[in-house]
Amino acid sequence: MPVLARRPFLQLSLGGVLCASTLHAAVARERVPARAESPNVGVDPLLVSTGLTGRWQAAMKQDLGWAARWTAMDTGVILTELEQGLIDAGLFLSHPRADALDKQGLIYNRKTIALTDVLLLGPQEDLAGIRSERDPSRALSQVLAAASAGAARWQPPLAGSSLAALADQLTQGLASRGIAAGTRPPAGNAPAYRLMSRAQWVKTPPRGEKLKVWMADSPALTLQAQIACSFRARHAGAKLLVSWLQWPLAQSAVKASRPAWQPIKE
């Protein structure tokens, strides 16, 4: 009798477990989009070359069941394609043009998901006279003044790049105006002063030059890795990607990329 009485209970319990398992599987299927729903995302090459997108992709497959389709392109190209709706989302470096597109409503869901600090590099000798300077704006302006006077050399960032925009912001537009011809020739064969992100320094440090880091670890000397969705594309998977990149698993991948990248939250 006890055995007979237990059997219906066991069957009921087993049925409950199976139902719960089926429900869980159904919910999981609903929460994990099909691979066809993976968004097409433009990514700045620096995020690719430093391995950050690879770490994200591996974690994404584990967590979401799909991975975004990365396409490497410069930040300027990403912002153009976001504006035109040619990509669903973009992972780019902070840039004034992104501010403008945001204000116009052409991109949305814009979030900062990682940081890389910027280094002011230069010759080991203090040719620009910035040894005691602590303000990056004044230090960079002094470098440009020294270069204009022929006392030092300045290697400007690539035109239109995020580093060029940062240099222009720090010097109130002086960096983009170019260096006036000095009355003296540049200082011998001494290396040129330049700005370089730590992510780039870690990946491809300058070789064959004796360089010194004159300034770093200043809040003003920072580039942000940002993501935004295209208003014209309106892709559901892109919205999910923006949220996921702020989750602990994605931020753990950023931590693993140190010192090239820093997470947005500790």
Image (spheres, rainbow, N blue to C red):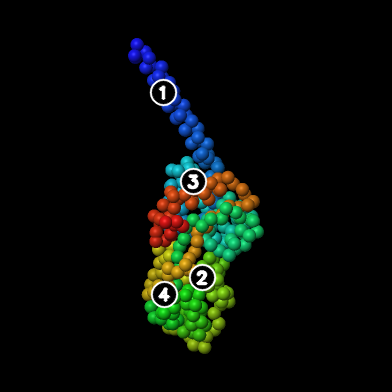
Image coordinates for residue 230, horizontal then vertical, percent: 60, 52
Q: Is residue 98 left or right of residue 146?
A: right
Q: Is residue 138 above or below residue 260?
A: below
x then y, percent, for residue 171:
54, 75
Q: Is residue 105 visible?
A: yes
Which residue is labeled 2 in the image? 157
Q: Secondary structure at mark 1?
A: helix
Q: Which residue is mark 3?
A: 67
Residue type at tag 2: Pro
Residue 132 percent location from the top left of the image: 41, 79
Q: Secondary structure at mark 4?
A: strand
Nearer to us of marks 4 and 3 is 4
Dot 4 corresponds to which residue? Answer: 214
Res 13 label:
1
Which residue does the image show at 44% across and 23% down from the upper left?
15
> Residues at badges 2 and 3 in contact (C-beta under 8 Å)?
no
